[in-house]
Amino acid sequence: GHCLCAERNPVVMADDDVTVREPLDLIRLSLDERIYVKLRGEREIRGKLHAYDQHLNMILGDVEEVITTVEVDDETYEEIMKQTKRAVKYLFVRGDAVTLVSPPLRT
């Protein structure tokens, strides 16, 4: 049988003439842009992407980090969502903690 999956068809993104062939191309197009990164452990960060490697290790600048924790009230057993925010000038993000990277919205 003929497998279409073997053919390397580039993915073309809407409203953008830039061709994305490899997953990391999307990251490359986001260099020097503010991106959104979701990490394991209910952590999310937004920052300017300064550098990355093939393992998705990243260096971000002017970072806002949001950590969401759930605490259970001792008496009512209600779950209380708490968000902790912090600003960091530079952050090294380890690739194996990354679950999602969203490039900037191009408007």
Image: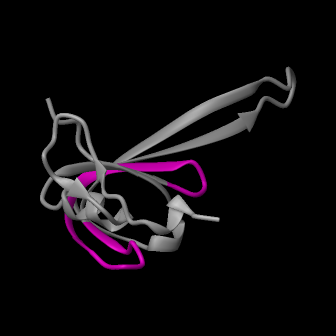
Q: Where residue 69 sits: x, y (%)? A: 62, 42
Would you say 79 lies left or right of 82 here?
Answer: right
Q: Which stretch did the figure color magenta?
A: 39-59
What residue sits 18% from the left and 58% below the top? Answer: 29
Q: How is the image coloured?
A: one colour
Would you say 38 lies left or right of 16 here?
Answer: right
Residue 19 occupies which quadrant of the picture?
A: bottom left
Q: Where residue 1 sits: x, y (%)? A: 65, 65
Would you say 11 lies left or right of 40 here?
Answer: left
Main SS of residues in magenta: strand
Q: Where 6 sits versus 100, above or below?
A: below
Query: Can residue 100 be found in the magenta stretch?
Result: no
What residue sits 24% from the left and 36% below the top? Answer: 14
Query: Can residue 45 be found in the magenta stretch?
Result: yes
Q: Where residue 97 sits: x, y (%)? A: 52, 66
What residue sits 68% from the left and 28% below the top? Answer: 80
Q: Nearer the viewer, residue 24 or 88?
A: 24
Q: Where residue 54 sits: x, y (%)? A: 36, 79
What residue sits 27% from the left and 64% below the top? Answer: 25
**Image quadrant where one finds the C terminus:** top left
